[in-house]
Amino acid sequence: MSGMTREEGSYAWRVLIMNREDQKEILGESQKTRRTREKLQRYLDRIEREVSPQALQKKSQEIHHWISRHSSDRVVLKSKDISLFDENRNSAKASGSVASLASRLEKEGLQGS
């Protein structure tokens, strides 16, 4: 249910549960299914109570406080050149097993010619 607000997502889950409740009269519902559905309903209710504007504001303040506490550990990126792919100009060093395999293949290639 991505792309939905919390209220829309909660509503969608409740509609899904309500639709399932309507179906249970037709299909019948096992005890295990009923307990699982009730457990899910309790979980959704608890989540709704916990995610409030005040809780979000508190978490936001905690994140800002953490960032300011760790500002001395930050790396200044204005002085660094960062790219996701540098066309293998700075490739990683080959591991020992890869290097030995490459040299063995090279020797076999020379002997086979």
Image (cartoon, rainbow, N blue to C red):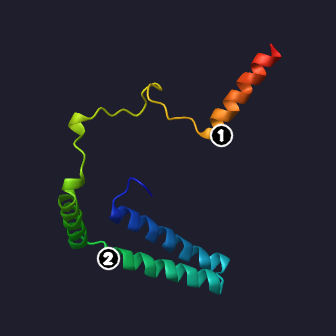
Asked whether 93 or 61 is in front, the reply is 93
Task: Examine the image and state in which quarter residue 100 appears.
Answer: top right
Residue at 24% from the left image edge and 39% from the top image edge: 77
Residue at 59% from the left image edge and 39% from the top image edge: 95
Tell us which disc is closer to us: 2 or 1: 1
Crowding at mark 2 (Cα within 10 Å: few <14, some 14-19, many 20+):
few
Badge 1 amino acid: Ser
Query: Tag 1 or tag 2, which sits nearer the N-term?
Result: 2
Disc 2 on helix, strand or loop?
helix
Please indicate whether residue 25 sits to the left or right of residue 6 in the image: right
Q: Which residue is mark 1?
A: 97
- Using the numbered discs, state the Cα–Cα distance from disc 2 to disc 1 in whole angstroms: 52 Å
Disc 1 on helix, strand or loop?
helix
Residue at 54% from the left image edge and 77% from the top image edge: 21
Query: Residue 7: horizontal and vertical position, in percent?
Result: 33, 65
User: Which quadrant of the figure contains the N terminus?
Assistant: bottom left
The tag on residue 3 is none
Query: Residue 29: horizontal and vertical position, in percent?
Result: 64, 81
Task: Examine the image and state in which quarter residue 5 appears.
Answer: bottom left
- The correct choice, above or below, for 94 with respect to 32 in the image is above
Please indicate whether residue 29 sits to the left or right of residue 104 in the image: left
Q: Which residue is mark 2?
A: 50
Asked whether 85 or 50 is in front, the reply is 85
Asked whether 98 or 3 is in front, the reply is 98
Query: Residue 89: horizontal and vertical position, in percent?
Result: 44, 25
User: Which quadrant of the figure contains the C terminus?
Assistant: top right
Badge 2 amino acid: Glu
